[in-house]
Image (cartoon, rainbow, N blue to C red):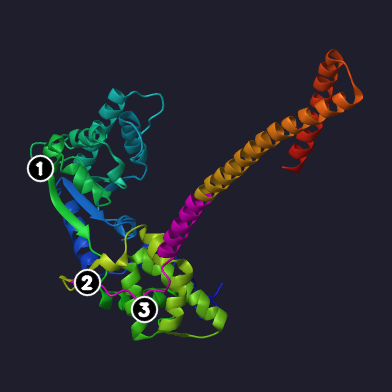
Amino acid sequence: MYEAFFNLKQKPFDLLPDPEFLFMSSSHKKVLSYLDYGIRERVGFILLTGEVGSGKTTIIRNLIKKNLTDVVLSKIFNTRVDSEQLIAMINDDFGLSVINKDKITLLRDLNTFLIEQFVKGNKPVLIIDEAQNLNHDLLEEIRMLSNLETDNAKLLQIILVGQPELRKTLASATLVQLRQRISINCHIQPLNKSEIELYILHRMEKAGDREAAIFFPETIDIIFTYSRGIPRLINIICDFILLAAFAEETRNIDAAMVQDIIGDLDFEYHYWGSESLDGHVMKENNTETASSPIRPEPVFSEMIKGINERLENMGKESETSSQKMFQEMFQEMTGKITELEKSLKSHQEKTGTLIKKIFKSNQITEEKQSELSNEETAQSLMGNMFGRMFRL
């Protein structure tokens, strides 16, 4: 979208693991040299770990693209499988037939293939990416594959690639035999602040123009703080920066623009989850230094927390208010009923006295008096009661 404006052949900060864009930081150089040495010397197991987005897959693809002499590769990227499926995928990637074959046959075919490659002078290499998803049983199955060897050489070189939690899995007491077979153990470190600037220039140069955009010094500090030196996160930030610069028709990237991008992306919580940058410790030049994040205010989590507390209080207030209202209504109704009872009793007494006077003046018989008294009194009381009830 913005390539033409910046005179670029392609997007410099794409998220695809393109080995052409691999930036050789000090950590990446060391890892590649370890991998190269391990394969050439048939050292057995190699463990490669790194944070999500640190460049593990890019390094593996770079290794594959180098097409090391006499190396035959099998690459496994889907690790959520069972034992038989894993062996089938390994054989299939080595070019072996897997149709209608059980696990025993698959293992026999693999062993025959590895011996043939050894006789030819080739080095079969198995690369298992996303190895942190492998359970203990599958890891033990992979260890058994390393038993395929001659008297003086391993028939299969195995590289386990995964996130840091893979190390925790391998620390289990049940995997001690596998752990002891790991000859090379390496971890990709995040980029430090000086490497981030070189990383940005390197990718823009690969895309067509090293000076396509000018990043002011303070912008590197902000990118370093929020990305924590993870290449994928640097790519995300810089891609949006170039998009914003294109919209504003400028090639100068200042701190205000980067802060706006960080705010729009809600970067801290969207990409780092509940982790706060306040407590994050960055490693630069092998020295741990507390970061000083520059971030937009207000912090959304505090706002949401405040809103939730207010809603909870409103609910409690509403509940209390409703209870109070019903209590007042009940008390009011009780009072009116009591008042009505007193009124009815008083009215009954007055009505009885009045009827006696009327009966006496008209000389009505006692039997008729009783009959009329009850009927008239009942009618009067009913009428008065209904009238009062409608007035409540």
Q: What element does badge 3 sit on?
A: helix
Residue nearest the observer in this picture, 185 or 193: 193
Label 3 Cα crowd, 10 Å radius (few <14 / some 14-19 / many 20+): many
Q: Amino acid at mark 2?
A: Ala
Residue at image point 44% right, 74% down = 207
Say which label, 2 or 1, has the lower sequence index. 1
Residue at image point 72% right, 30% down = 349
Circle on res. 166: none
> Left or right of 172: which side holds 134?
right
Say which label, 2 or 3, has the lower sequence index. 3
Q: For the image shown, how many numbered marks are present on the structure?
A: 3
Say which label, 1 or 3, has the lower sequence index. 1
Residue at image point 32% right, 63% down = 276
Are the residues at dot 2 and dot 1 in contact (C-beta closer than 8 Å)? no
Q: Nearer the viewer, mark 2 or mark 3?
A: 2
Q: Which residue is mark 2?
A: 290
> Left or right of 385: which side holds 302?
left
Q: Point out residue 257 in the picture as x, y percentages from the top left corner.
A: 46, 80
Q: Which residue is mark 3?
A: 201
Q: Amino acid at mark 1?
A: Gln
* Prevailing secondary structure of the magenta residues: helix
Height in image: 171 above or below 252?
above
Q: What element does badge 2 sit on?
A: strand
Height in image: 322 above or below 289?
above
Q: What element does badge 1 sit on?
A: helix
Label 1 Cα crowd, 10 Å radius (few <14 / some 14-19 / many 20+): few
Q: Point out residue 169 in the picture as x, y percentages from the top left corner.
A: 21, 42
Q: Which residue is mark 1?
A: 180
Q: Which residues are magenta?
A: 289-318
State the CA–CA distance, disc 2 to disc 1: 36 Å
Are the residues at dot 1 and dot 3 in contact (C-beta closer than 8 Å)? no
